[in-house]
Image (cartoon, rainbow, N blue to C red):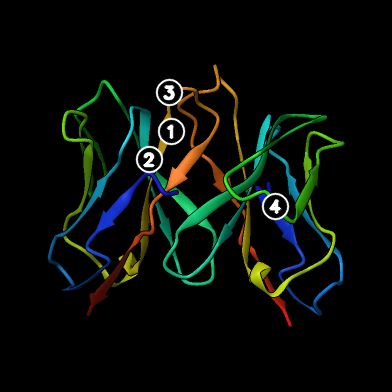
Amino acid sequence: NAGVTQTPKFRVLKTGQSMTLLCAQDMNHEYMYWYRQDPGMGLRLIHYSVGEGTTAKGEVPDGYNVSRLKKQNFLLGLESAAPSQTSVYFCASSYSRGAHNQPQHFGDGTRLSIL
Amino acid sequence: SQQGEEDPQALSIQEGENATMNCSYKTSINNLQWYRQNSGRGLVHLILIRSNEREKHSGRLRVTLDTSKKSSSLLITASRAADTASYFCATEGEYGNKLVFGAGTILRVKS
C-alpha cells in the first residue's frame, strides 16, 4: 500500500517549456487535490477533483491544467512554465463520506525549478 | 488568501517541555485539522476536530477549538526531538471538499 505517489520528485525546466506532474493513489479515494507550497505561505490549492472525469479550480489555478481520466490518477500540467511557478507541488487525496470531515493524505512532493 | 494563521511562526524548546501552537481563522468552519510536515516530506494528518467539539486528544496531542473566538490550539506534551517539524492548521469550510491552510509553525525540539 503505497498511499499517494508523485512523479517526478525533482525537475528543472526552462521558461516556456511544458511538463506534466503525475499523482497516483491506491486508496480508492474519490477526492484528489493539487497544492503548491512556497516559503512562508503554507499550501495553496491549485485544482481539485471530486471524482473521475471532474475537475474544479482552486485558489491559484492560472497557468495550470489538470485531468482526472482515471480515479487513481490526477495529472497537473504546466503548458508554458514561468519562473513564478518555481515551487514544491503536493498532491493529496481523501475519502468521500458526505464530502465532510475526511483527512487528506499527501504525497512527498515534486520540487520544480524554472529557470 | 489564507484562512488559518498560526502563532508563533517559530518555536524552539527543550526536549521534555510542552509546545503550544495557536491557529486563528476568519469564517465559519465545518472542521479544523492539524498536520505535521517533516523536512522534505509531505504533510501528515494529526488530528481533526469538528465545529461542535471543544477538545480532542490523541496520544501526546491535545487540540482545543473555540468557535466563538475562531481559534484553535495544538498542545504537544513531553516533546521529543522527533517532534521537530512544521505544523499546519487547516480549515474546512461549511461547503466541504476543500481545506485552507495556514502558513505554519516551525517547531524545533532540542535534545
Question: What is the CA distance from the residue labelled 1 to the residue labelled 4?
Answer: 23 Å
Tell me how far mark 3 sits from mark 4, CA to CA: 25 Å
Amino acid type shown at disc 1 = Glu
Instruction: Tell me the residue at 38%/58% (across/down).
Output: B103
Q: Given the image, what chain letter belongs to the residue carrying mark 3?
A: B
Subunit of label 4: A
Spatial distance from mark 1 to mark 2, Cα to Cα? 8 Å
Rendered location of residue A23, percent (x, y): 74, 51
Query: Residue B87: x and y, percent?
Result: 35, 58
Residue at mark 2: B33
On the same chain: label 3 and label 4? no
**Mark 3 highlights which residue?**
B94
Residue A101: image location, x then y, percent = 45, 27
Q: CA separation, marks 4 and 2? A: 27 Å
Q: In terms of depth relative to the viewer, which is nearer, A34 or B13? A: A34
Q: Is residue B91 left or right of residue B51?
A: right
**Image quadrant of residue A52?**
top right
Identify the amino acid type marked 2. Gln
Secondary structure category for the residue under label 3: loop
**Tag shown at residue B92:** 1
Q: In which quarter of the image is the C terminus of chain B?
A: bottom left
Q: Residue at x 21, y 29 (%)?
A: B67
**Dot 2: chain letter:** B
